[in-house]
Image: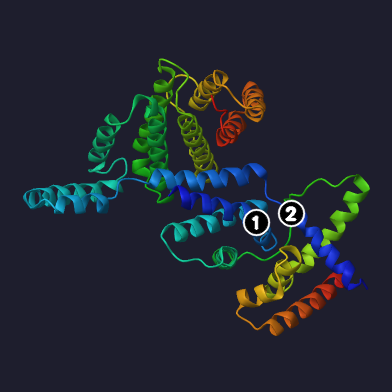
Amino acid sequence: MGDKKEQFGRVYDQCIDKIYRFVFLKVSSAEVAEDLTSEAFVRYWECFNSGQNIDNPRAFLYQIARNLVVDHYREKGRAQFVSMDNISMADPVNLEEKAILSSDIKAVRQSLAGLKEDYQNVIIWHYLDELTIPEIAKMMGRSEEAARVLLHRALGSLRSKIKEI
Amino acid sequence: MISEQQLISRIKGLNQIKPRKDWVFLTKTRILGEASSEKGISIWEVLPRILFHPKLAIASALTIFTILGLVGFTRNSLPGDPLYAIKRVGEKTQAVFISEEKQPGAQLELANKRLNELTKIAESNQIKKLASALQEYQASIGQAAKNLTQQKSATTSDPSVIKNIAQQTQKLEDAKDRLERIYGIAGLEAKEGENPTKIITDWLIKDLEKRTLTEDQADLLSEAKESFSIEDYNTALIKILQLSELNYPQN
């Protein structure tokens, strides 16, 4: 058990920020993101502790998180919108920088939330979580070429959305 | 039109979204804490040893099936159910085998169980059982705080005892908050005396004051004391939990 806990602890420390951010970018509040992220890690622990073979913990956690987000919207019938009220960030250096940063980030977040799920995922995974194209392709069950095309289209779509704001 | 580089740089700005540090810490502690409390002696560890002694096999099998049957029936019983009394007797019997040092932590675990029962009742809207569940919880948390203050010495030899008490108290606070916020259930304090969380946190601080701590642990203890002085017992508990996660200095 001790060894399992240690291994879980390592995965938790490596992935908690990423999974939280992934969920937060898809739901409307920090509170919901915390609930769903906790649930994702509890489910991961249950599978891991029951002896289930998990080749790629990060991919496994993303899959659980995706399912939880889908269930969340299905159950509650919530509209996907982005609120800046609950955003939790490190404090920028000064007020001017904070204003520019907030406005840029707000536009990106709003636009990202308006994209279809695959586009959101590929952008988050590649640019925020720094996954490589082969890793993304594997997680999405697509070829590397298809993943590359998807990322290209996702960026184009995001750019168009930002322009609309 | 923004360039691709500018767009990517803005996307990367989202890296600033981070979860609260105390939430990250508490979630990990809670998941692993629950895993520890779930760990018990498995029947599958005991059964093979008995089966290798044929004379004992039949008598043991009968006893095991009777016990398993009772445990199965009573485990999910709630206050107000006919089998609840049997469940409580089982818990009291188990408590006899727990060392004096670990009694406060065990008592707090029981208070957590009572609060879970209360939550189940509230979730399933079983109004008739609500009063007895509340009574069971109040008695349990009151007893836990009383046991703690009656300990002969505030200093225990095992640091994990401190951690367990802080974890259990923190879980109680979370569950209480949830019950009050979601179901509007008030009166979740012990019937008599002071706030049990205050008593327990005070006890933990006094214990830690007598210990040799590292510099980081001493800083966290100071922060815990500061939070305690302004009656923010929840933050004080978080600090104590953080402290107990660090390694104590070797004597």
Secondary structure of the residue carrying tag 1 is helix
What amino acid is found at the position of numbered circle 2 in the picture? Ile
Q: Residue at x 28, y 36 (%)?
A: B91
Residue B48, image x, y percentages: 20, 54
> Badge 1 local density, few (<14 within 10 Å), some, or many (20+)?
many
Q: Is residue B141 left or right of residue B174?
A: left
Asked if A140 appears above or below B82 in the picture, the reply is below
Q: CA distance from mark 2 to mark 1?
A: 9 Å
The figure's colour scheme reads rainbow
Residue A25, image x, y percentages: 70, 61
Determine which quarter of the picture holds residue B78: top left
Give the residue pinned by disc 1: A20
Q: Residue furthest top?
A: B152
Whether marks 2 and 1 lie on the same chain = no
Q: Residue at x 85, y 47 (%)?
A: A92
Give the residue pinned by disc 2: B17
Secondary structure of the residue carrying tag 2 is loop
What amino acid is found at the position of numbered circle 1 in the picture? Tyr
